[in-house]
Image (cartoon, coloured by chain):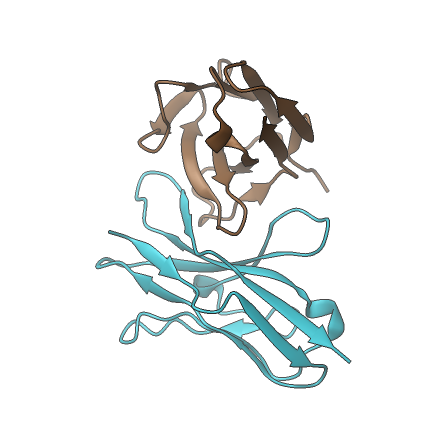
Amino acid sequence: AQRVTQPEKLLSVFKGAPVELKCNYSYSGSPELFWYVQYSRQRLQLLLRHISRESIKGFTADLNKGETSFHLKKPFAQEEDSAMYYCALSINQAGTALIFGKGTTLSVSS
Amino acid sequence: EAEVAQSPRYKITEKSQAVAFWCDPISGHATLYWYRQILGQGPELLVQFQDESVVDDSQLPKDRFSAERLKGVDSTLKIQPAELGDSAMYLCASSLRNTGRRAFFGQGTRLTVV
């Protein structure tokens, strides 16, 4: 069955430290991977997707099909990065439903 | 920027009562989703519409849950009767057809069943 695993419930770092939020997926086909973010009292929103190979707010994520991973990285964390981060997998050919991981809370302190 | 609208924001209901949630997607978005998010978990798909047609409702507990999108625009999710285990955040999302999976989410309805 398709599954997304985010092993860390909480990741606490100091401002300026590097950040890596881990995401592993289980899917035998060709996946589409996403990172969604939810800041305090805001709605869930797309941060980035692997097909775009983009950097958003300093975050990047590379799809590693060999390790079935899509880890989110940022070299220097900022306090405003504190939020809940969800990794999501899309496998539906006809539609666009997402399978989410349980999420990781990132806490950046000064 | 256009947003997905949901109402109510909060709902408290007694078990065995009926409850309904409403969602208005971004104008022009053909695909609409209802997700349920239990505390401490990620969102889980309940039902997906393409225009007015159900594309996927495999995870919808059809004995008590129903969803409709009659004119292919706004949508209603109903629970009857509500059970204690239905307490959760109910999220609506929408996306353009064939946009590479980018979904825009509403703020959700927090349901508490007492």
Is residue B63 positioned above or below A63 on the image?
above
Q: Nearer the viewer, residue B85 or A19?
A: B85
The tally of labels here is 0
Q: Which corner quadrant of the image does residue A63 belong to?
A: bottom left
Q: Is residue B96 visible?
A: no
Left or right: B109 in relation to B57: right
Q: Quadrant of the N terminus of chain B?
A: top right
Q: Nearer the viewer, residue B28 or B48?
A: B48
Image coords of residue A47 (percent x, y): 58, 60
**Outermost residue toward the front in this view:** B114
Left or right: B102 in relation to B111: left
Q: Nearer the viewer, residue A27 or A93?
A: A27
Image coords of residue B97 (percent x, y): 46, 37
Chain depicted in brown: B
Which residue is located at x 69 percent, y 31 percent?
A: B9
Is residue A18 positioned above or below A61 on the image?
below
Which residue is located at x 36 percent, y 26 percent?
A: B61
Chain depicted in cyan: A
Which residue is located at x 54 percent, y 21 percent?
A: B75
Q: Is residue B42 visible?
A: yes
Image coords of residue B43 (percent x, y): 48, 45
